[in-house]
Image (tube, rainbow, N blue to C red):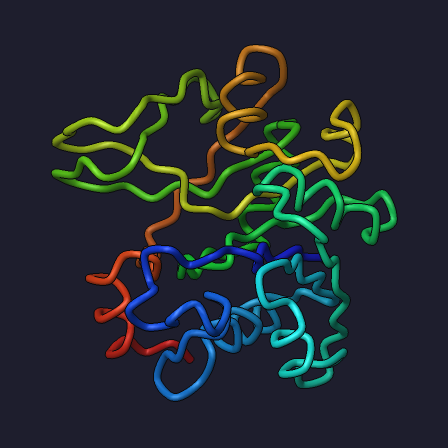
Amino acid sequence: MIAIVLAGGLGTRLRPVTGDLIPKALVPVQGKPFLHWQLNYLKKQGIKKIILAVSFHAGQVIEYFGTDFQGLPLEYSVEKKALGTGGATKRAMTLTGNKPVFVCNGDTWFKVNLEKMRQKHRLAGHAVTLALKKMNRFDRYGSVSLGSKDRIVHFEEKKWLETGYINGGIYYFNPGLLRDYPPDTAFSLEKDFFEKMVKEIKIGGYRSPASFIDIGIPEDYRKIQSLDLR
């Protein structure tokens, strides 16, 4: 299995922590960069190769992690300009050999069982599958509506909900899905691909009970410092 980690974010909401001097992927969590914990999780899930999509302070990430993480090969897709989640994913996919691939946001902690997610994706015949987290009494995330076989039929904007499923920032892609977007063009996976293509292709959901944390939110950044991440 191959994974792309989107690790090029500016970390605007974490400026009190980063001071704009380090990328969000290197913010300290329990004495190590947050990206360390993500790579450790992906290795334990059976990922055999990781491509890090980097932009803001890319050199710091490359210098820190090099080309190997505990025996797991690392490659880098370096953006000369920020390409958004979509453009970064498309660029990194040039290194995946036209194979299915996991894509993970570099600022969320969501210990999804990737093998079960992949199995559901294949059985349901979806083109891309999103890991979903059930939330209660929330308004800071958009949500999804699910149909038969957990196919996503609609994306909702942020609003107050008593309960609902949110996009957890882990995706499993069939190859070739982003071929119509020009190379090195900035676009958003969430807005410009998932939401626009939801009626055209089969976008599935995989419901995971794992804890979800968005470290870009200061409250969650504090919370993750006391979680068991191993």
Foreground residue among 204 and 23: 23
The picture places residue 170, in percent across and down from the top left corner, at 51, 48
Q: Residue furthest top?
A: 199
Residue at the image position 47 percent from the left and 33 percent from the top: 205
Percent x, y of residue 70? 67, 85
User: Between residues 95 and 20, which one lies in front from this camera angle?
Assistant: 20
Instruction: Give the quadrant of residue 27.
Output: bottom left
Q: Eyeballing the image, is 121 above or below 92? A: above
Q: Is residue 180 left or right of residue 64?
A: right
Residue 49, x across and y down, in percent: 74, 66
At horizontal 55% and vertical 11% (from top left) the residue drawn is: 199
Image quarter where the N terminus lies is: bottom right
Image location of residue 24, percent across then percent down: 46, 65
Q: Residue at x 56, y 39 (%)?
A: 120
Q: Which residue shows up at 73% across the image and 30% down it?
A: 178
191 left or right, relative to 184: left
- Picture quarter containing residue 155? top left
